[in-house]
Image: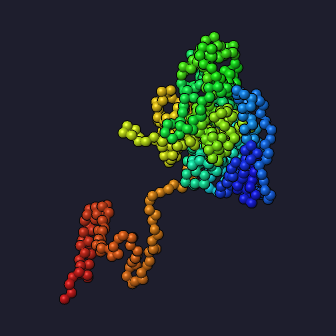
């Protein structure tokens, strides 16, 4: 496992693979590395931390923990990837016993609710470890551990009963998120959490929610690492779905020409691999597989679900027309089912052996993802690796996605759209090109606008959207953070002015104010107007209507005139 570096107050640790240190990682401000959990976290109030005083080294490599049957089938035994796997065994996260019904999938809603949507109120509160520093996405995610385990990391059996996912755990997620989103993995980009940024870390949590909402659909619900054979062609599951589903051809999805084509994995037509995952329903299609051979002698058929066997009495093509599985070893793996020779090749360059051979510092320098694509699922470090490869794909493909403005369409930039969504109150626009819809399309089929792909709309889009709003509103409870997060402003701050003073005088009191900046010191004189007193109309009416009051009024007026107004001689 990873080891704390002495003398760093548990803030630095050795990242170990295959019994050797491959990286030195810093936890970040306010965090410390917890060896029991395998990632950096906040210190609880009153908690004491015992950091090692002596030098630590990575432990020796333990024996493999997986049976040979779980490993990919290769052309020769000596190429078995077990000899190149890291052996980072972590202490289990020990989630609380699962005792709740799963979140029911329903039409999405942007309504803000105070607790997860369920058939009964939540009886257990999330962990009580409150953040001690502001603006940290990691601490907020950790504080929602119980809710994430109960409503996100949930899988379903063939009967529809829910259970905690065994492939995707909170422990593996937090380990990978710490490296991919905080410490970094040697690239000039990482998973956007905006850790420590009080003004933007909510953006990072929304990004995290969008990632999870898609991972739930791609793999977590099925508790699988390898892509399943799920698409029917005229009611039958064709064996050549290994080459690509939804009309795609994974082995032909090379990186863009010009600067990144060298990242693509080379297609080895002699490669033989069998996936480790298959469906759980009765007589489900077998795992995807690839092997050499094409032409009439190597035609692939379809899977008969009624008899539970493969029918090979004639060719049966997938949507793209393939009737063989030669070179078709590039199906999806990991939490996002990362597919294709380009995407898997990028993993090998940024995280694996290809990058290490070229002098890069990578997390898994001995793992060759191009030579053994199934290693994402068979590695002894698989729990973390399933998350790490997915977080990498999201960071590299989705977060960096951008289209330029043209005469017929506006440009689209992921970070701009993320900020627009958060600043707009995280309310869905009900538009077909809303934030979560566009992001899900970028993941598959690779463009953001509705109708942008000939293969049609991304599958289960409504469920991805429902997952997204469930996570931001009811699991991460981000609406409360919007009220706490300071918003930047461009308005000038009003400067305090001198308090008014009272000038001593024998005349009525005069208030002397300091003039506002920018105005003349001497203000122009103002005329004082006396507002005439208007008598009550009822009183006027009474005076005029009473004849006996006229002489008295006239006499009073005359006396006033004689006393005050008549000039004295």
Of 207 and 134, which appears nearest the observer? 207
Tell me where residue 248 appears, x and y as whole percent. 54, 27
Left or right for 65, reference 344? right
Q: Quadrant of residue 95?
A: top right
Is residue 480 something that shows in the picture? Answer: no
Above or below, comparing residue 226 to residue 62 in the picture: above
Tell me where residue 543 appears, x and y as whole percent. 28, 65
Is residue 493 something that shows in the picture? Answer: yes
Above or below, comparing residue 545 to residue 232 in the picture: below
Left or right for 301, reference 161? left
Residue shown at 55% from the left, 50% from the top: 482
Numbered circles on residues, count: 0
Of 99 and 390, which appears nearest the observer? 390
Above or below, comparing residue 283 to residue 497 in the picture: above
Task: Residue lying at the far bottom in this picture: please name it.
Answer: 569
Residue shown at 79% from the left, 36% from the top: 65
Left or right for 392, reference 423? right
Q: Quadrant of residue 365?
A: top right
């Amino acid at each position: 496992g990873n080891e704390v570096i002495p003398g760093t107050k548990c803030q630095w640790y050795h990242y170990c693979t295959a019994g050797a240190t491959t990286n030195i990682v810093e936890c970040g401000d306010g965090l410390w590395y917890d060896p029991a959990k395998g990632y950096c976290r906040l210190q609880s109030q009153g908690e004491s931390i015992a950091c090692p005083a002596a030098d630590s080294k990575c432990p020796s490599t333990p024996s493999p923990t997986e049976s040979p049957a779980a490993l990919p089938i290769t052309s020769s035994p000596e190429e078995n990837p077990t000899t190149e796997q890291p052996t980072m065994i972590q202490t289990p996260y020990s989630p609380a016993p699962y005792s709740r019904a799963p979140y029911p999938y329903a039409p999405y809603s942007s309504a803000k609710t105070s607790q997860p949507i369920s058939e009964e109120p939540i009886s257990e509160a999330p962990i009580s470890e409150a953040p001690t520093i502001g603006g940290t996405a990691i601490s907020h995610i950790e504080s929602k551990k119980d809710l994430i385990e109960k409503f996100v990391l949930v899988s379903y059996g063939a009967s529809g009963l829910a259970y905690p996912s065994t492939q995707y755990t909170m422990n593996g997620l937090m380990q990978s998120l710490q490296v991919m989103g905080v410490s970094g993995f040697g690239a000039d980009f990482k998973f956007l959490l905006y850790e420590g940024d009080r003004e933007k870390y909510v953006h990072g949590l929304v990004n995290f929610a969008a990632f999870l909402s898609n991972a739930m659909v791609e793999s977590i619900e099925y508790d699988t690492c390898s892509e399943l054979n799920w698409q029917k062609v005229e009611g039958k599951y064709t064996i050549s779905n290994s080459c690509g589903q939804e009309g795609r051809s994974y082995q032909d999805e090379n990186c863009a020409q010009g600067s990144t084509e060298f990242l693509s994995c080379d297609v080895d037509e002699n490669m033989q691999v069998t996936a480790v995952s298959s469906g759980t329903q009765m007589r489900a299609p077998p795992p995807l597989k690839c092997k050499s051979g094409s032409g009439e002698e190597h035609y692939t058929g379809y899977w008969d679900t009624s008899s539970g066997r493969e029918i090979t009495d004639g060719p049966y093509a997938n949507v793209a027309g393939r009737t063989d599985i030669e070179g078709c070893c590039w199906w999806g793996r990991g939490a996002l089912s990362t597919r294709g020779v380009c995407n898997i090749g990028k993993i090998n360059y940024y995280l694996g052996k290809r990058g290490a051979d070229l002098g890069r510092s990578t997390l898994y320098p001995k793992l060759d993802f191009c030579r053994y694509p199934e290693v994402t699922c068979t590695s002894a470090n698989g729990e973390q690796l399933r998350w790490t490869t997915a977080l990498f794909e999201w960071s590299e493909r989705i977060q960096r996605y951008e289209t330029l403005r043209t005469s017929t369409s506006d440009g689209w930039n992921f970070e701009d759209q993320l900020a627009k969504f958060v600043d707009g109150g995280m309310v869905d626009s009900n538009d077909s090109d809303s934030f979560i819809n566009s992001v899900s399309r970028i993941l598959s089929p690779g463009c953001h606008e509705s109708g942008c792909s000939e293969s049609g709309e991304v599958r289960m889009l409504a469920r991805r959207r429902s997952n997204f709003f469930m996570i931001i509103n009811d699991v991460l409870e981000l609406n409360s953070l919007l009220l706490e997060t300071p918003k930047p402003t461009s308005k000038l701050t009003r400067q305090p002015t001198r308090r008014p003073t009272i000038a001593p005088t024998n005349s009525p009191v005069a208030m002397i104010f300091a003039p506002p900046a920018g105005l003349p010191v001497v203000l122009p004189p103002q005329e004082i107007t006396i507002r005439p007193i208007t008598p009550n109309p009822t009183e006027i009416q009474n005076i005029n209507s009473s004849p006996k009051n006229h002489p008295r009024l006239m006499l009073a007026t005359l006396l006033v005139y004689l006393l005050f107004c008549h000039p004295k001689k």
